[in-house]
Image (tube, grey):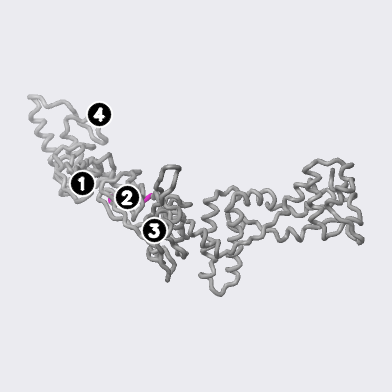
Amino acid sequence: MNSMKIKLLISNKYYSPSLLCNFQKLNHHIFSSSLSYSTLCNKRLFQHFVKPLNSYSYKSIHTTSYLSNKKDFYNILGVPKNASQKEIKKAYYQLAKKFHPDTNKGDPSASKKFQEVSEAYEVLGDEKKRSTYDTWGSTGNPNHMGGPGGGTGNDNFQNAWSYQSNVDAEELFRKIFNQSGFGQNSSFEEDFADSKFGFGAAEEIVVKISFEQAARGVNKDLNLNVVDICPKCRGSRCEIGYKATTCTHCNGTGMETVSRGPFLMKSTCRQCQGSRVVIKNPCIECHGKGSTVQHKKVTVPVPAGIEDGQTIRILVNRNEVFVTFKVEKSDYFRRDGSDIHTDAKISISQALLGGSIRVRGIYDDHTVQISPGTSSHTKIRLIKQGMKRVNSNLLGDHYVNIKIEVPKHLTKKQEALVKAYAELEESTPGTIKDLHYKKDGPSSDQTQSTQTADDGIFTKIKKALLG
């Protein structure tokens, strides 16, 4: 049966806006019980819901003004509709503390918001009330209410749910904060309160360090969330001017005796949750916990020899924090475990005649001796000059990879000297540009010609040097 048929059944004799609630009962009964048209027309059943009136002037139902006062409790607390009870309670904590009259004296809007937040939590914090609210009080389109084509009865009246709180907001606030607990049976496992910095202390952080810092070790200052003593109550857990009182339920022992038939068992006190004291006026800042989440500067010791991606565990106040290090790559050093590798360039003269070079190390600079005839890519090992191994006093080695730097441009003197030297080489594979000579060794009957050739070479060297 649609809403048009219902309208036809409501005569001017039986309808009045003041009896809207009775008509709603009738409409709900019709659609929930699937009554037939003939049953609906039964006068006794109809009069059970509405009473005759002499006046008649209305023929339609309007509920838009009624719905305009409807509140979205999820929106008030700022939580999604699938939020858990823990998330709802956390949201209430934050908002109640923010809009509490004690922290917003002289601001009437804050007091109104505090009342609104308390009302929202009173409904959503109770699973039974929340279920009813989700069924009948969820937000919808008020234009779908009543009138022709208004849909089914359930659709029409799911938005017509309302709730009037009878609990004082301040009383609810104190009650919830007292239920925050100080032991294992509390609604939250943590023994600290959330703050504007987050819902808990940092558990894992990533720290970027340079290659040299990773090699030598350093103390790194970081800003992160830590759990520390409440700055307002100084750990007393009470509002300023109040003190905790000894629990009368357990006489300050934290334990109570429970009778189980013929047996007597001891368990944690249900009144004080084992804390031995009762706090009637808990600190608003820390919710009576004595500690809060705070944003502080913490010095993290970076051990020498730490590797990229390596994680260590440190203790910050009472919490463990896992620190993962991101080591930047070096343009000079290359790492292989605890060993390091660097490149060093030498000239042709140093490669031929030998010499020494200065090499930058992890901890100090080193003088490296170059032996005569050193070829390119020769590796020179500097023992115990590498990286320190974490949690050990052992050191790796520093390997210097020699590279011979060949000049791209020669002066005329340099070119003449190189050509003179090339004429003396006996093991040159192939040929040399702009140079012609015989590679056959001198024979016994060529002594004079060899002497003449040597004189020619020295003449060229002398000419190259003196011009």
The stretch of residues the image draws in magenta is 206-212
Q: How would you rate the neighbour count of disc 4 (Cα within 10 Å): few for under 14, some for 14-19, many for 20 or more?
A: few
Instruction: Find out whether the residues at labels 4 and 2 contact each other: C-beta distance under 8 Å.
Output: no
Which marked residue is nearer to the observer: mark 3 or mark 1?
A: 3
Please determine whether, in this image, residue 419 is positioned above or below residue 156.
Answer: above
- Residue 382, picture quadrant: top left
Disc 4 secondary structure class: loop
Identified at 83% across, 52% down, the residue is 49
- Residue position for label 1: 413
The mark closer to the camera, 4 or 2, is 2
Residue type marked 2: Ile
Q: Residue at x 59, y 47 (%)?
A: 82
SS for tag 3? Answer: loop
Q: CA distance from mark 2 to mark 3?
A: 40 Å
Q: Earlier in the sequence, mark 4 or mark 2?
A: 2
Circle 2/circle 3 CB separation < 8 Å:
no
Residue 35 x, y percent position in the rendering: 83, 41
Question: Disc number at residue 430?
Answer: 4
